[in-house]
Image (spheres, rainbow, N blue to C red):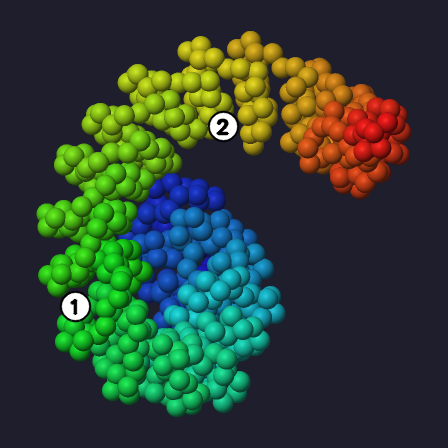
Amino acid sequence: MPQSDNSRNDMNEWKRMRLEHEVNIPTEALKPSAGIQDIPLEVLKNIFTYVGIGNYFPIGYVSKDFSYNYLAMNIVHDAYRHPMDYLLAARRNMITYPDGVSSSIDLAEYCFLHAPEGFQLEVCFNAASKGRLDIVKLAKVFDVYPENDHELNELLNELTSKFIDKNNDDLEALKEYFIEYCMNNESQRNVFVSSAAHNGNLYILKWIHASYDISSEAPDVCSGAITGGHLEIIEWGLDTFKLDFEKQNYVNEALRAGDLEIVKWFRNRNASWNQDSFLSAVKSRNIALLDWLWEQGCPLYDHNYCNAAVDWNPRYYNNEKALEVLQWLHQHDFRWDESTCMIAAAVGNIDALLYARTNGCDWDSQTLETAVEHVRFDIVKYCLQNNCPQGHSVFDLLHMAYDESLAMLKLLVASSVPWDARTCNRVARSGKLEAFKFCLSQGCRIDNSTMKNVIQSENMALIQYCLDNNYPFYVEDYEEAVACEDPIPLLKLFQEYGYELNERTCALAARYGDIQLLRWLKYKGYPWDEETCIQAVLFNCYEALVYAHGNGCVWTKRTFAMCFDLENGLGLAGTYVQIPTQHECSDEIFNYILEQNCPQPDPSDWQILPTLNDRAN
């Protein structure tokens, strides 16, 4: 039953006493202060009525405390005109929960009208997985579909796994939403079919095969089944589509998947090895599979199998099992070299590196350089402490974008790794003020390009620090400032420190087509000359040309001539076989110049190369 106004007011007061702050539009995640036992049965009934019996999560999963959802629910009624408004406003706090929205056709409709696209897709997916055909049909009306194959792959991978051995009624929502969308597009059809095979969903595959021609996707059926470990689907796919497993190289796919049972199944049907078979098994990181291949006499080729064992593998995280495989290979006398240590450094596998070095594997400067590049502190420390060879580019590989970059910088300096002005320039370009200060405090040299790199960082604090400490900026550095995304604050800062802008600044603004900057320079009374129009023509900036000329900037014969020499940028200063007649600038610019009567060069103004006859005379 609906609550009376008095009852509702009392409930609101009860609720607000349990919130830390009383707000109209919450921007911070709310905190529960009551347990489910504190919520009256009448309130629980109201919640169930609102979202559907059995669904306890209409709002979100920020807190497992059920009362949290109740308290947030009341905020929805009080502060917003529609419940979904609160869900959308609080999205960044993860209060929204598509599963709850997909329980109500009204909420879903509001979501399809106002929610972000990603959230809409999640709602539709949840509705399809629940068999809510009404919401799925509504999603089609609003054209709610995945934007790319990656989204579709993730969605289908989870969705097809929910419909294993189901009857037709359970698949109606799936059919309604995905079939028309997926089956008319080859790449999306591949994703759908391989996803169903990977999840062991033979029912869906048979149903699709009965309704559509998926012969071109047949190889994906077996590939998906191999990665998912579903022998029944492999047999069905080979038999149904008459696939040649030798031609498709399925045995190597099974080896990469590390599925010994499926590998044996193919071998029992006379599937042959090839040069990548043992390598595929190494990448699977399955010791039992390697033992079996070794016993079977699988042929070996000129691969660095140790590198494959250590290298990054999408099937595993945190270098899982890599050391175990590396040890197995070393015990069986497989070769390794400097690149093995380098790869271990790249993936951050300190255990593999230690094992390789302890057992005589060589290394070179690339090991340290790679560890620095990938910010592997433990490996960098090990390299420095154990006299790893150093090249001349260690600091060049330090990516200052990482949060740990300053600590890495200090570690290298403390270990007396050589550096030069290039290091300071890289740090300057990153905009890391503290790192820049550290470099200067340690005596790292700067050069004429350092301040240019400071400007490129667009870090106002760093730029002001350099100005305060009288580090020299040059007129040429203005070009870097003008090229920045937001140049006006930078130029204002230069002015405050006594740096004057000149005609070149306006010309640079025209070159980059920055109308806002050009307007600001004009408003501030900074001078411009014919070079402004020339740069606008040279870099095909129509709006800059129109604004400059329309506001009194002069143009000359040189402006007109530049239309014919964008490649070299010489205009009348260039040499030509004959007077050019074909303009290289945009038609828009050339027509404007003609219409506005830009001065044109006389024939004698062009520098024409003499012909052979002229030379003879």
Dot 2 amino acid type: Gln
Task: Provide the secondary structure element on which disc 2 rests.
Answer: helix
> Does 82 sit above or below residue 495?
below
Answer few, some or many: residues within 10 Å of disc 1's Cα (few below 14, many 20 plus, some between 14 and 19).
Answer: some
Dot 1 amino acid type: Ile
> Residue 190, position in %: x, y?
47, 74
Is the residue under label 2 in contact with that under label 1 (CB below 8 Å)? no
Task: Provide the secondary structure element on which disc 1 rests.
Answer: helix
Image quadrant where one finds the N terminus: bottom left
* Earlier residue among tags 1 and 2: 1
Asked whether residue 543 is in view, the answer is: no
Which callout, 1 or 2, points to the residue nearer the camera? Answer: 1
Residue at the (71%, 15%) spot, across then down: 527
Left or right side of 490 for 417: left
Task: Please identify the quarter of the rendering in which residue 223 is found.
Answer: bottom left
> Does 158 sit above or below residue 360?
below
Image quadrant where one finds the C terminus: top right
Label 2: which residue?
456
> Does 111 sit above or below residue 365?
below
Q: Nearer the viewer, residue 262 or 460?
A: 262
Residue at the (74%, 18%) spot, across then down: 529
Q: Nearer the viewer, residue 576 or 93?
A: 576
> Residue 493, position in %: x, y?
54, 17
Task: Please identify the quarter of the rendering in which residue 27 is found.
Answer: top left
Q: Which mark is residue 287?
A: 1
